Amino acid sequence: MKNFDFLIVGAGLYGATFARTATDKGYRCLVVDRRNNIGGNIYTEAVNGINVHRYGAHIFHTSDRTAWDFACRFAQFNRYTNTVVANYKGELYSMPFNMYTFNKMWGVITPAQARAKLDEQIAEGFTGTPSNLEEQALSLIGPDIYNKLIKGYTEKQWGRPATELPAFIIKRLPVRLTYDNNYFNDSYQGIPIGGYTGWIENMLEGIEVRTGTDFLKERDGLSAISEKIIYSGMIDEFYGYCLGELGYRSLRFETELMPEIDDFQGNAVINYTDSETPYTRIIEHKHFEFGTGKGTVVTREYPAEWKRGDEPYYPLNNELNNKRYADYCELGENDIHVEFGGRLGKYRYYDMDDTILDAMADFKRITK
């Protein structure tokens, strides 16, 4: 008899949700993670009394009541609302695109004036069938906003000219003809009071967790004690890159404690949308939890090419990579002892609520 019904590789949100859901139904779970901490990329760490998002800003938001109720089982959420500011060479704009943006860009005041200006801009943009991201953006928003608020940021994020990026990356662009600068449209939004690490700790309460444990180095021993593996790491790495590497974008973070500065930028997130600034955004962590104490902590976020050994943050879902991923999935279909989940196992970008719902759905499908 095996020691565990499920060996869950990855102590991030997907793995923790699956483990909690399975444990609540009476299954025996072991969670392992190669890092020395739980939480995956939503890991937060207290620095000078400030909960620092070590792997980039994360704001929980959803309109799905099931995801929200599950999230609230393990922490009280604050009322943080994500209001992003875009800095283009010292000009500050509100994101997503709303009346504050249009007023700053064109001096318009009423929704009717903004709509007329947008229509004029779109007519000046690209009017054919878009074949790349630049043409798609120009067809949706026109040249002024594209050149100041989209082009530089996007090219830094993906490390390629916008004319070489697929059009589907920007399927639509949010446009609000109101003075509403809430980045999200969801019904529920906030951040766990005390940080995400405590939230995941509560989610994993009563479940055996082994950090600093690399499954790929201990595969035989760990596989021997479990009936089924739930793997939320990279599917191509799991199979030793036998079909080739999948493409990813990575990130590099520079975090700075500023004990003598109480407020560095006045907002949690400011995006730098020009092409000359090497980072894409600066995060000031204390604003996520309305901090008013002495000192502050800021993080500059630099996009980077991914190579083996780096953390893969964003899948490059082009035709070649999607075909290669499908080939890896065929290998997985023939391997009855493993299921792949999460953003790396399924090679797609997930918001946090999507991750929770997907882990729940996977558990239901596997155990039906």
Image: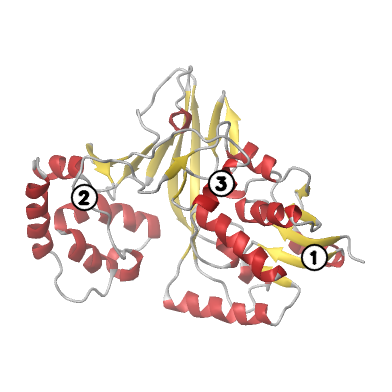
Tell me the element at label 3.
helix
Q: Which residue is mark 1?
A: 219
Distance (Cα) linking label 3 and label 2: 39 Å
Tell me if residue 315 comes above or below residue 109 in the rendering: below
Q: Is residue 344 visible?
A: yes
- For marks 3 and 1 on the same chain, the one whose residue lies earlier in the sequence: 3
3 vs 1, front mark: 3
Name the secondary structure under disc 1: helix
Q: Residues within 10 Å of mark 2 (few under 14, many from 20)?
A: many
Residue flagged by tag 2: what amino acid is it?
Lys
- Indicate which disc, 2 or 1, sits on the residue closer to the N terminus: 2
Query: Looking at the picture, how far across and down is residue 236, in whole percent?
Result: 62, 71
Q: Is residue 157 above or below residue 76?
A: below
Quadrant position of the C terminus in the picture: bottom right
Q: Nearer the viewer, residue 327 or 253?
A: 327
Which badge, 3 or 2, comes first in the chain's sequence?
3
Q: Residue at x 9, y 40 (%)?
A: 109
The N terminus is located in which quarter?
bottom right
Q: CA distance from mark 3 to mark 1?
A: 35 Å
Image position, residue 160 (x, y; %): 35, 63
**Residue linked to disc 3:** 69
Residue 181 is situated, as x and y percent measured from the top left of the image, at 28, 40
User: How many numbered discs, if any?
Assistant: 3
* Amino acid type shown at disc 3: Asp
Q: Residue at x 40, y 34 (%)?
A: 268
Q: Is residue 252 above or below residue 255?
A: below
Q: CA distance from mark 2 to mark 1?
A: 49 Å
The residue tagged 2 is: 148
